[in-house]
Image: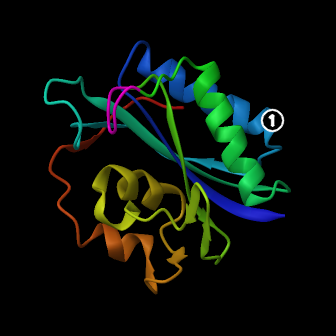
Amino acid sequence: MHRYAVALGSNLGDRLEHLRQGVTRLEREAGARELRKSRVYDTDPVGGPQEQPPYLNAAVAFHSALEPQHLLELLLDIERREGRVRLEPSGPRTLDLDLLLCDDLRLEQPGLTVPHPRMHLRAFVLAPLADVAPGWIVPGLGQTVSALLAKVDTTGVRPTDLRL
């Protein structure tokens, strides 16, 4: 079994429902066990088109028997089934699922880099991740998720009362 962390984001349609569907499909299709869900955060868009709507972001941590490449393929398939269309980098999306961490591994394969290469710079990723895995030491950085969160500007990342 592998221990995983995945970030979820949505800024089109029923944002909360897209996040919930992503979690439900991970539970069913990835065999996610011991699943921990973060709070839901309302966040300002980072990068991409200037006038896109705000995001809802969350994170989950879980165990799965899937290998990292297979989990990535499943994440991309779940995004497609939730209506994700990739028109431009950092553009609006119904559902974004990013594989952030796998065990204490550092992987560089075509289309897959773990840990996610920009996660340590993004408050909208680190804040929800700190809810479910605050003490996870990020491979290659040697710091916990909480320590990395303390170093980034969290302006524009607001916890909500919404639940996954």
**Residues in magenta, as a range:** 87-92
> What kind of secondary structure does the magenta stretch mostly adopt?
loop
The secondary element bearing badge 1 is classed as: helix
Q: Residue at x 29, y 64 (%)?
A: 121
Q: Looking at this view, name the residue that lies furthest to the bottom.
A: 142
Q: Residue at x 39, y 71 (%)?
A: 146
Q: Which of 44 and 114 is in front in this view?
A: 114
Is 66 on the left-hand or right-hand side of 84? right
Q: Residue at x 64, y 78 (%)?
A: 104
Q: How many marks?
A: 1
Q: Where is residue 43, by image quadrant?
A: top left
Is 108 on the left-hand or right-hand side of 55? right
**Residue assigned mark 1:** 29
Q: Residue 126, how many percent across, how many down?
A: 38, 59
Against 31, residue 78 (above or below) is above
Against 146, residue 73 (above or below) is above
Q: Looking at this view, name the residue that lies furthest to the top.
A: 13
Look at the image and tell me in which quarter the N terminus lies. bottom right
Determine if residue 40 is in view: no
